[in-house]
Image: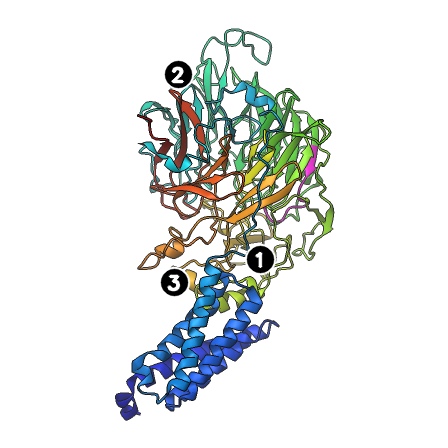
Amino acid sequence: MSTIIRSRPWVVLTALIFALCGVYLAVGGAWLLTYGDTPYYLICGLALLGVSFLVWRGNQAALWLYTAVILGSLIWAIGEVGIDFWSLVPRGDIIVVLGIWLLLPFVTRQIPAGRAATLPLAASVALAIVVVMVAFVQDPSDKVGNLPTDKVADAGADAAQVPDGDWHAYGRTQFGDRFSPLKQINSDNVHKLQTAWTQRTGDLKGPNDPGEATNEATPVAVNGTLYFCSLHQKLFAVDGATGKTKWVFDPHLYINPGFQHLTCRGVTYHESDASAVTSDGTPAPDECHHRLFLPVNDGRMFAVDADSGKVCPSFGNNGEIDLRTPHMPYTKVGDYEPTSPPVVTDKMMIISGAVTDNGSVKEPSGVTRAFDLFTGKLVWVFDPSNPDPNQMPGPDHKYVPNSPNSWITSSYDANLGLIYIPTGVQTPDEWGGNRTADAERYASGVLALHADTGKLAWFYQTVHHDLWDMDLPSQMSLVDIKQQDGTVVPAIYAPAKTGNIFVLDRRDGHLIVPAPEQATPQGAAPGDHVSPTQPFSALSLRPKELLTGKDTWGGTVFDQLICRIAFHQLDYRGTFTPPSEKGTLVYPGNLGMFEWGGLAVDPQRQIAIANPIALPFVSQLVPRGPHNPLWPAQNEVLSPGGEAGIQHNYGAPYAVVLNPFLNPLTTRLGFPIPCKRPPWGYMAGIDLRTNKVIWQHRNGTLRDSLYNSALPIPLPPLKAGVPSLGGPLTTAGNVAFLTSTLDFYIRAYDVTNGKTLWQDRLPAGGQSTPMTYTANGKQYVVTYAGGHGSFGTKMGDYLVAYALPDQH
């Protein structure tokens, strides 16, 4: 043996490599075959073992056999996934590399192989490379089309209240459209954009901050001044032309690592004059005629003078109200967190808030409340789990614990006097065996209330008995849709985590786009149940086909095989497969296909831009037992500090473990590779006249992903299509912007066809929604690049503004 190794070391090494690869694929392939999946891996593994034996014997038949392996692998891969670059690569990269290895001179010199054996092997390697190159320049997931360009409607009733160059609310207007009528920057000149200024807040993640520390703020703009909140909810006023800070208001946030969220998505602006009156009809205090409402994660709300940065003293207790006391159950700081800006009417500020997901059955209420805009007095409540949701609190009544909450901004139609609230589900999210009919009544749907009284107008439920955290995650968009006969229908577009976009008449909640009930998988955990049907909207970006083993992915054939086996070990029977002790594949995943960024709607062209996500999650119920007690130990922090990993669900029969569906082996090695093939994120264009998706393109690269950062050499920025957290902005200049992808870019897109027109590198993760405004007659596009703790992007404190170069 030692003589052979000394005389033919490369043959020995080659035989060993092929033997190890063959054993791995043969054993894994046999395991996979027990699930009824493809026999390819077993066959390939046995063939590699044959090549290893022939190489060891110095037999040129090794090259002929491996030629057959390459050609057979190529035929199998194309037959299974087509000419798809990202799907072909893990099926063939190692196979081709091994073929090249066999052709190297130091190997062929020790295997007496003539041209008759080497040429076919070289040709098969070349053919495989050519197929991959052809696949690289096309995209079978791409959908090409053009949105209509003609303007058929007005900008919307709420837009008339906002000057063209301003941005007064989270979605610019309280219609939640994220549309600007500005067109100084347009699809013809957007490629000339340059950084105009960068402002740093100095507010960075600290050692006591939770993992879900996120910079998601969208600034508001009023007359050339920007107002936005940083990580610890400091409120900044910034000169829109120069980026210089005018003032800073610090609410002195109380924080600890047990908070589930550390997030401020923005503030809301309101103007009044000397004629303003309170909700009681009395004259409003003569102060703060330009005021900002700042939600703070420790459960407070501030009213701040936009001109001076001082609190408005007549609002609540010297400018602030405490949303946790005196009537909220379970008032521990951090369990109730207002993370999103409120709605304002001419007399009231209306706020909902996030409660800790999956911490305990003893959580605060998700009640929505209206406070007097000027005095902070409580005017009305809507507590979804209360049999009388409008019952005011008092000495003998507190809000109902664990009432379904709404954690994102609502929408408001002043003409109809209705506020539209996207609701979630009673926590624990993945266990519903103890929910009452009252707790289910207004969960996971569109809740329309009369803004002056809080009385119910109508409700539409988008998920029945929600066990997947498939709430409505974003501010809904109000659009006046012009019909072919000239009539106008006031519609509401409600994007759901499921990928459905529910379209309803916002006057009465009747469906405009059909959403028929369809049968869904059954088999809930003991003590729970599953709704037999769920509504599925005809307007949707959800996957139309079930995932199968061929949809699994990896960087190589080895980890793709691991993901394929892991896929079969989970319970998956399509959307709404119930959570299980075995482990359930949740797709669309817990991030949802839509998240808090929502849609960007051009009401004039009647079109919408979206950035859906396509990343599966795994949900596994963990029964109570000695290592999973029913209640926490004394003084244990209940809040998990994030929404992934173990979720305790204290008081419920099960805890739950939630994670993205990642390769179990490579993740442990520092390479968190998704187990579903790309794309994991898109940009999409929707025609609201026909309610059809017209174009859809994968969006974003692996340049800044965790997968890349673990490699010693950065990968090239290949367009894979990555997840995004944040929303798009669209403008009358036929250009849309997005900054929220896993890679650190701001990108501009042609609204009509979705093509990328421009991009620029951001200094940190851009998990926020950009906005645009004018200052001194010049249009700027601004984004907050501060990163996202749980999304894994680089943290920072950068407010970055872009503009066209000055003309000289």
Q: Position of residue 361 (x, y in %)?
A: 58, 43
Q: Position of residue 299 (x, y in %)?
A: 48, 30
Q: Main secondary structure of the magenta part?
A: loop
- The dot on residue 669 is 3
- The dot on residue 693 is none
Q: Is residue 207 above or below residue 43?
A: above
Q: Earlier in the sequence, mark 2 or mark 1?
A: 2
Q: Which residues are magenta?
A: 459-469
Q: Residue at x 47, y 46 (%)?
A: 640
Nearer to me, 21 or 729: 729
Q: Secondary structure at mark 2?
A: loop
Q: Position of residue 343 (x, y in %)?
A: 55, 25
Amino acid, disc 1: Leu
Q: Secondary structure at mark 3?
A: loop
* Left or right: residue 771 compared with residue 379: left
- Return the residue at label 2: 307
Amino acid, disc 2: Asp
Q: Residue at x 67, y 46 (%)?
A: 465
Q: Earlier in the sequence, mark 3 or mark 2?
A: 2
- Return the residue at label 1: 585
Q: Quadrant of the C terminus?
A: top left
- CB under 8 Å between callouts 2 and 1? no
- Magenta highlight on residue 463: yes
Q: Position of residue 307 (x, y in %)?
A: 39, 16
Q: Earlier in the sequence, mark 1 or mark 3?
A: 1
Nearer to me, 794 or 364: 794
Badge 1: residue crowd in 10 Å (few <14, some 14–19, many ≥20): many
Quote the CA–CA distance across marks 3 and 2.
Answer: 52 Å
Nearer to me, 269 or 231: 269
Quote the CA–CA distance across marks 1 and 3.
Answer: 22 Å
* Left or right: residue 499 compared with residue 98: right
